[in-house]
Image (spheres, rainbow, N blue to C red):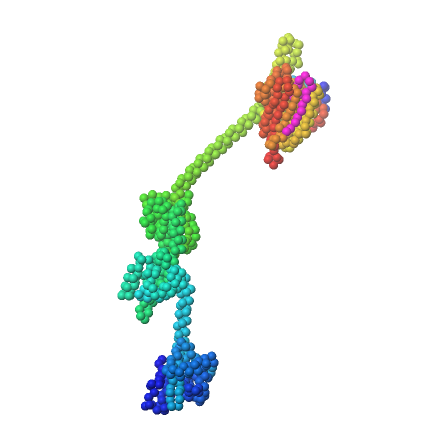
Amino acid sequence: MKPTLTNSRPAEILLVEDNEHDVVLTEEGFKQAKLLVNLHHVENGAQCMAFLRKQDPYEQAPTPDLVLLDLNMPVMDGREVLTELVSDENLNHLPIVILTTSGEQQDILKMYKLRCSSYITKPVDFDQFLRVIRSIGEYWFTVVVLPR
Amino acid sequence: MSSLTLTSDFVQPIFSATHLQTILEAAPVAMVMVDARGPIVFVNREAEQLFGYSRDELLGQSVEMLAPEASRHRLSEWQQLLLAEPRSRHLGANHDLLGLRKDGRQVPLKISLTPLHTDEGTFVLATLDDISEWKHAQDVIRNEEERLRAMLTAALDAVIMIDDQGRVTEWNPQAESLFGWSAEEAIGQSLDTLIIPPQYQEAHRRGLQIFRETGFSLILNKRIEMPALRRTGEEFPVELAVAPIRRPHGYEFSAFIRDLTERHRLETRFRAMIESAPMAMLLTDQQGTIQMINAQTEAMFGYPREELLGQGVEILFPERFREQHPHLRREFFIHPQEQRLGGVGSNLLGLRKDGTEFPLEWGLGPIDTDEGPCVLSAIVDITERQKMNDVIKASNETLEQRVNERTAELLHSNLALERSNLDLQQFAYIASHDLQTPLRGIVGFAQLLQRNYQGKLDEQADGWISRMVESALRMHQLIQDLLSYSAVDSRARAFEPVNMSELVAETVRVLEPAIVETNTRVEWDDLPTILGDRSQLAQLLQNLIGNAIKYHHVEPPRVRVTAERTSREWIFAVRDNGIGIDPKHHDRIFEIFRRLHTQQAYPGTGIGLAVCRRVVHRHGGRIWVESELGRGSVFYFTIPERRVEDL
């Protein structure tokens, strides 16, 4: 499926994920899904905040169109990131999609209460994972109108 | 009062008629002379005064005018008598003679009549004494006597009087009934032989003699108790008080005598009651002096009776209690009412003769006696009771301690359980995230290998890669199942009313693809509404009905869900016509990951029935199976009857 980006440029996606294998699988997923994206990667919440606020060493980083946020991470986890983002005037417009292994009801409820944009549980099966990646691309970059 | 009486013998020729008249006139007594034929021929001054007539009004008149109507006839009788037998006659007070005065008043009179024979014929000279005052004095005396007699007669006590020789002078009706002798029989008799028992007769006589000689007596004016004798010879107790009465010729003695038989009987009964009481009893007077005790008191305090009688009651208490006792006793007599002192838990102690002390309970009540208000006490030795109480207290304490220990243990195991529940939830989380992440790596990269290198390696490599993917996916499934098993507790929801018929219908809709595929028929009765966790009960039904479909025989599966009510619970049954289960496996099938079949024959992880058991247990019920190989199975589970108020 050919992605149709509204502004005809690669979508900027920030992947906040501490697990290397998941990062590779996610990159592979976007590649196999044939989505044209610039996938940026940080390993924890602290780096994520620095990236979004363009702090050292991310002064040159673009503002992402979408953040894929894992929940369980060292240093600063996804819950803390979301809590901080929500209260930040400059950043609380960003769509945040939680992409995590946890299917805990508590987590799901809490994240939606913090107004996350979507909550997605990572499927173990790669085929299913691929479908999820495709859906994300399709939904966020062709269906949804994002702020410029 | 003396009267001058002229007799015929006395009238001597030396006195002339004039002399005689002067004498009669001056006599200090009323005189009336009557002609034998009737009319009054002479009255003196006294007579004029007596009758209130003047001489002129009387002389020549019939003497009858001086007599009341009723007694006039007697006048002529006396006249006849005097004339027939001429001598002086004295008609005294006992004749009740009355004179009639001019003013109509009647005067009691004493009359002497003397016949006088003169030359002029026969006359009767009457001398008249006004006995009004004497009569009045007599009446007073008679009244006094009557009053005295009435008193004696009405007296409740027997009243006896004797003279100083011991002879009975007075004997009232009570004395008659008390001793059995009538007054007639008794009066004049010697008292000792009448009512005094032989052993006291000598003392009685000597007492009288001593009094006569010295005026001294031991018994006068005192209440004394002694036995007396009835006419029947029976001795009985009396109380008597003797008082001397001075008489002109010596002394008389009055005795008031009361029968003590009844009082003695009551007293004996009272003593017997006290004596037979199962507890120590004692009677003390207002001064705290012990008046009476029973054998239990002797035994309890170790004193013989005679050592306690007459002692202050303080002797029965240890020294340290004695000081306050007089004060307490005074208080008691100010507000006499029943009280209870001591008892279990109190420190009131009794003191035995041997110096040992013991705990007691002391009940006391006011009682009126002849000797004044007294205190009747009942005392119980509560050594045993105190001991029992201590034992009970000790065992209560032990019990309490045990309860506390058990409570602590329970709290501890509750904590442990809570901790293990937390651990379990922790584990579930770890399983869901930390185990799955590397697993997703294995599956993901293996599947990437499969996708990108299928056919580029040899056939064996392709086979191994797909086995790796299968194994990893199965592990993923196991982890998922383990999660759902632990979720029975960690994701439990509050109980609510659940209509089981509706829930079965819902389950059938969920399982519809399998039902259609296997051509299963699911039937159910009108099932009750029970209180439970709706989603867990749905899972239970889904697992049981799902199993019934899954483990089917050659013919199309038939599943029937029924419910039966007992006194305390609902018994649900899910019945199928499937392959059945060998009874030797009936217990094991509910264990987690326990399977009876190969993955190839019937795929699955073996979590379904384990989850079922966990759900049923969480609802307080039981689950079991009745089945034989090839004959289908019936899975039963119970849900206890609950009411919404119980939640």
- Which sits in the foreground, B437 or B370? B370
Q: Is residue B552 covered in magenta?
A: yes
Q: Is residue B349 covered in magenta?
A: no
Q: Which part of the image, by quadrant, shows the C terminus of chain B?
A: top right
Boundaries of the magenta span: B548-564
Query: Which x, y percent locates residue B162?
Result: 34, 65
Query: Which x, y percent locates residue A70?
Result: 61, 24
Q: Is residue B107 left or right of residue B246?
A: right
- Which sits in the foreground, B129 or B513? B129
- Whether B248 is drawn above or below B637: the answer is below
Q: In this view, does B132 lie to the left or right of B475?
A: left
- Which sits in the foreground, B95 or A18? B95
Query: Which x, y percent locates residue B155?
Result: 41, 63
For the point 36% across and 54% down, the residue is: B287
Query: Which x, y percent locates residue A85?
Result: 62, 29
For the point 41% across and 68% down, the residue is: B147
Asked if one can make out residue B36 in the rendered structure from this viewpoint, the answer is yes
Residue ranking furthest to the top: B458
For the point 40% across and 68% down, the residue is: B148
Residue ranking furthest to the front: B84
- Whether B450 is drawn above or below B106: the answer is above
Q: Which part of the image, by quadrant, shows the N terminus of chain B?
A: bottom left
